[in-house]
Amino acid sequence: MHKIMVLNAKGGCGKTTIATTLACYFVSNGYSTALMDFDPQQSSNRWLKVRSPEQPRIKAIDGARHQAGVTRSWQLHGGDETEIVIIDTPAGVTGGKLVDLYHKADSILIPVMPSIIDLQAMELFLGELGRLLKQSQHRKHVGVIANRVRMKGRSYHAIEELMEEVGLPLVSVLRDTQNYSIAMESGLGICELKPGISAKDKKHWDPILEWLFQTIPSKQRKLDLAPTSPGRWPSAVA
């Protein structure tokens, strides 16, 4: 089982959208997938309730509320058959809560918006996360996604500079588009929308999936990705 966490202490950066999109990519390609929601607002689990039963099934795990009559570890167990667990996290995660979540993940994706406010919050968060990375005996697979980018302006380039400074990869750039809202409202992921409206967005996800497969346990790869070359820079936003 491989656990992919979408994590950032800053709210409104697109954690739930990225988590649900990842869940759709894996389940649509034959991976037994669970979506674990630690956010008290339960946005990911509410999205699952909207999802049509005709779509590939994604298992829901409520990580925010303790279930009576079962242990915490059993409540969070995705099942022996589960191959991929996508973990959606709440805003404001610091201190002990961050430590607890950090140890639950194999891979961590950090979405950040290209704004000065988000960038300042990101610097503080990365400082706390960086201390965990140094203390950890097992190196985590950590990458950053620039999310809702309209144009590569000053704030975007500040993200590039910060990633270079802290030594984390900027895995991909996702454009600002209504397609994600359309997908969320329909209980779908970008990969499940009609190709005519989502082809451009799917290309932006190729580097993310390639990056994740660097550490996902060996299994015949079923994801139909566009060819990529080693060290390819994140897709340009158009």
Image: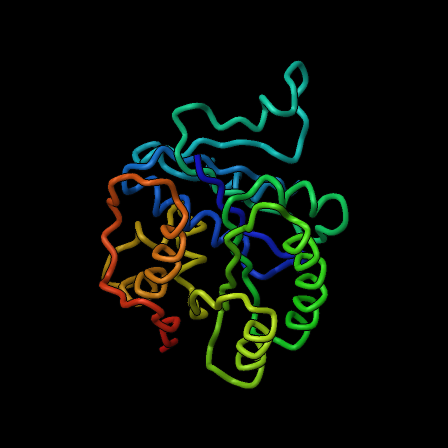
Residue 166 location (% of width, % of height): 60, 69
Counting labels gives 0
Check the image and report above or below for 49 versus 126: above
Q: Is residue 227 left or right of residue 184?
A: left
Q: Position of residue 163 (x, y in %)?
A: 56, 72
From the top left corner, tell me how far across and down residue 213 is, in percent.
36, 50
At a point 63% along the width and 54% down the height, the residue shown is 133
Relative to residue 123, is residue 26 drawn left or right?
A: left
Relative to 66, 228 lies left or right: left
Residue at left offset 68%, top offset 18%: 68
Going by the picture, which residue comes out furthest to the front?
A: 137
Q: Residue at x 76, y 44 (%)?
A: 96
Depth check: give the residue in front, 194 or 81. Answer: 81
Depth check, front residue: 169 or 38: 169
Where residue 207 appears, x then y in whole percent? 36, 62
Quarter of the picture holding the C terminus? bottom left
For the N terminus, which image quadrant? top left
Q: Is residue 180 left or right of residue 90?
A: left
Q: Residue furthest top?
A: 69
Instruction: Reply above or below: 177 against 221.
Output: below
Q: Residue at x 55, y 59 (%)?
A: 110
In the displayed orientation, state which residue is furthest to the bottom.
Answer: 154
Q: Nearer the viewer, residue 61 or 227?
A: 227
Task: Specify the color scheme.
Answer: rainbow
